[in-house]
Image: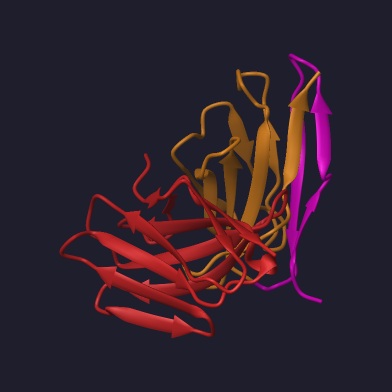
Chain colours: A orange, B red
């Protein structure tokens, strides 16, 4: 079945470590996105990519980095510079800007 | 930046009743979307309404858009326990790739 796969579902990070969240899609979508969701809140855009080898910052890009080397993959690295990384991270993709199709998220916690 | 804001924040109804959620936004938009999120899961796209449309239906869902008041409403008719979820409105900015989400309405449908 076509869809978006995020892994792992749960991730724990020690302070000072970088950690990478995986997002893979087999929908043949050009655009991919990363969002952060805090408890009881809506989603905030971290980075998005309209096409391979190109990406743009969203509203809260500080402390995060991304790459888009393949159409199917858009990994997100949470760096040690992100002071409050504990959150639910959602990846999405779209064939046109809208609508967006979401994965089931990765919950990141700090040990 | 938060553009869409939902009202109420939480709603509890009996199965079979209708549920109405409202969304307000601040600037001009090209389209407005509604998404559903079950607990601990990703978002599922429900419906998209364009700025030149006033009403749209999809099954038991009815969405209205009033661009003069910068507001939208989502009506779920004949609610079911399976409709229990959080509902988010999302609006686009100039780039169309940047969705701005509200903080959501948590709907509980009691059997």
Height in image: B13 above or below B18? Answer: above
Q: Nearer the viewer, residue B29 or A72?
A: B29
Q: What is the quadrant of the C terminus of chain B in the image? A: bottom right
Can residue B50 be seen here? The reply is yes
Q: Nearer the viewer, residue B67 or A8?
A: B67
Residue located at (29% from left, 52% from top): B25
Q: x and y percent of residue B81 in the render? A: 68, 66
Does B68 lie within the magenta span? no
Residue located at (42% from left, 54% from top): B98
Height in image: B59 above or below B71? Answer: below
- Quarter of the image for residue A51 reads bottom right
- Quarter of the image for residue A77 reads top right
Q: x and y percent of residue A84 in the render? A: 61, 21
Magenta region = A1-28
Does A18 lie within the magenta span? yes
Q: x and y percent of residue B91 in the render? A: 37, 58
């Amino acid at each position: 079945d076509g869809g978006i796969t995020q892994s792992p579902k749960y991730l724990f990070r020690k302070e000072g470590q970088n950690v990478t969240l995986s997002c893979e899609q087999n929908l043949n979508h050009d655009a991919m996105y990363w969002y952060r969701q805090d408890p009881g809140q809506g989603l905030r855009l971290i980075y998005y990519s309209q096409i391979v080898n190109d990406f743009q910052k969203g509203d809260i890009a500080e402390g995060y980095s991304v790459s888009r080397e393949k159409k199917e993959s858009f990994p997100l690295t949470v760096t040690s510079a992100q002071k409050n990384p504990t959150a639910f991270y959602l990846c999405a993709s779209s064939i046109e800007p809208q609508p967006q199709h979401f994965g089931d998220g990765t919950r990141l916690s700090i040990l | 930046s938060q553009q869409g804001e939902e009202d109420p924040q939480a709603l509890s109804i009996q199965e079979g009743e209708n549920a109405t959620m409202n969304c307000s936004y601040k600037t001009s938009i090209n389209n407005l979307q509604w998404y559903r999120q079950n607990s601990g899961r990703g978002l599922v796209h429900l419906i998209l309404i364009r700025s030149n449309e006033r009403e749209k239906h999809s099954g038991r869902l009815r969405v209205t858009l009033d661009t003069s008041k910068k507001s939208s409403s989502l009506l779920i008719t004949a609610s079911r326990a399976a409709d229990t979820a959080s509902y988010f409105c999302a609006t686009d900015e100039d780039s169309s790739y940047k969705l701005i989400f509200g903080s959501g309405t948590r709907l509980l449908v009691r059997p």
